[in-house]
Amino acid sequence: MKRLIPLLLVFCLLVSACGAKGSILKYDIPAPVASLDPQFVTDTTASMIVSNVFEGLFRQLPSGEVEPCIAEEWTVSPDGLVYTFRLRQGIRWNRSLSETGTWTTNSARWSDPEGTPVTAHDFVFALRRLFDENHMSELAAHFLCIRNAPQILAGEMNSRMLGVRADSDYTLEITLSQPNRQLPELLASSAAMPCNQAFYESTRGRYGLDVDTLMSNGPFYVSIWNNDTAIALRRSEVYREDLPVRALGVNFYFPNSESFDPLARFLNGDTDACEIDYAHLAEMEKAGCSVTSFEDTVWVLALNQDEVGTEGYSFSRAVAHTVDRDRFSGYLTENLRTTSVLVPPAVSSSGESFRAFAGELSPTVYSPFLARQYYAETLEQGDAPNLREILVCDEGNLPLLAGYVQQGLQNNLSIYTTLVRLPRKELLERVAAGDYQAAILPLTVSYSSPEAIFSCFHAESSQNFTGYDSQPFEALLSSAALIPVDQLYSVYKEAEQRLLYDCPVVPLFFETSYYAVAPGVSGIAFSPFLAGMRFQDAVKK
């Protein structure tokens, strides 16, 4: 009975709208959320929720464009190294209301949670938290362009030496070690959301782990966080007056039994939107649902350079030339299409698609002659390739498609491998830990720039899961920070070609993601990037 009472209370709060104007949207998420600490969330679902309850200096739109939020105005020094932001005033922190109607708080050391202004000091503290010597964030590697960041990451300096400072309550200065035109995109990510130091310290190491230890500044706040039932967001009453929030809130539900079926729940009207696969696309359109799609993912064959036992990239090139993508014909669903290039079509800038600019020609074509030539070169160098198994997701036709990759190695190089079929989560965990020789896995863009893919191949990046290390590649990306915006795609095209030539990964096919919205529901802003979707303007008839 003691457990039943809280669950009944949660149910009542979820279904009640308290007479407020607006609709409560309902959406299923794949699993409970462990943390909503913006500086540490790497899970896509948590990042999506963070994007609805926090607001940073910038926001990335579904088109890929970046618009200012709390950064009202900014200037850049002539050398491109110093960014000075003037922050919008009137932005306030928001806390959850308890069921008694009072502000929740878990520490007597924190007072006046309602109405506390968001200041430049909150951004300084947030960015320094990424590089905290006692608990370094995985996301810190994205911000190595900030002055002293590499030295702090290497343990040579402390986080207070990071090139960020508050010149006043509403003036923030960020100094870079080298120019980086992607800084606004980086500052739109969850990792750069503000964090109030006084409140953070009051949580005593539990920041972002439950309702009582979370304080946000976006269009919604977290009103319920029950990992047995649901997570509920409700409209903030202290959000910006110039940006009305049309939705009253959002209820996120997750599987609570083996029979939990998000698609069936959507078709039954239990939820208002749903990520769907291609097989159900026609059914959604027939039911009058609106569908949004993005070609935002590339599936690749990744080679762990530290495990295959070869120097240089001759062996990787040999493997790449054994892949006959024509063999996939007839086995790809219509949301998949073969590709020999890396950057997905969803990436665009100023309305121009990178793929339209760069084209789809690649040096990684099927060629048994080149495969054997590069393999002979590998053996001449005295290397003995260690490639005994290929990890593959145990989903749909992926094991069958991996079988054709396996056959290409066997037929052209006499390399015999075993396919290891794994759940996607386990496969990605093994790849992230470096516990693999080769794997077929998806790469999805987190923001609208080729850098979103290239960041996986920076030599010093914690996301570099292949161990790729190329000075020509690094030099190209460094040069991108110094050239005019209208020339960026040219450099990125050259950088992509370098990756395709060295073959730390071999592109196989692009995947399209689909989202369906129920009839009568509008205003949900879907995005191909990590923020996923925003509910601020959602309405339901």
Image (cartoon, rainbow, N blue to C red):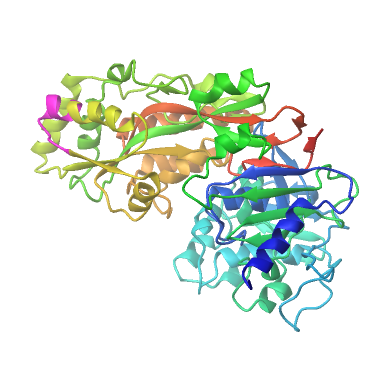
| Dominant SS in magenta | helix
Left or right: residue 242 compared with residue 278: right
Identity of the residue furthest to the front in this view: 1
Residue 439 in picture, x, y percent from top left: 30, 41
Total numbered badges shown on the rendered structure: 0
Is 440 inside the magenta-drawn segment? no
145 vs 263: above or below = below
Asked if one can make out residue 187 in the rendered structure from this viewpoint, the answer is no
Q: Quadrant of the N terminus?
A: bottom right
**Residue 413 magenta-drawn?**
yes
Instruction: Farthest residue to the bottom: give it.
Output: 108
Q: In this view, does 516 lie above or below 466?
A: above
Of the pair 87 and 421, the residue shown nearer to us: 421
Image-quadrant location for residue 53: bottom right
Q: Which residue is drawn at 36% across and 34% down?
A: 300
Horizontal placement of 116 versus 360: left or right? right
Q: In this view, does 523 lie above or below 20?
A: above
- State which region is magenta: 408-417
- Looking at the rendered image, the quarter that the C terminus falls into is top right
In-image side of 396 versus 492 (left or right): left
* Quarter location, residue 119: bottom right
Depth check: give the residue in front, 362 or 474.
362
Q: Position of residue 352 (x, y in %)?
A: 62, 23
**Could you say which quadrant of the image residue 270 lies in?**
top right
Q: Residue placed at 66% from the left, 76% from the top?
A: 203
Residue 322's spot in the image, x, y percent?
A: 22, 25
Q: Is residue 91 visible?
A: yes
Percent coordinates x, y for residue 515 in the rendering: 60, 31
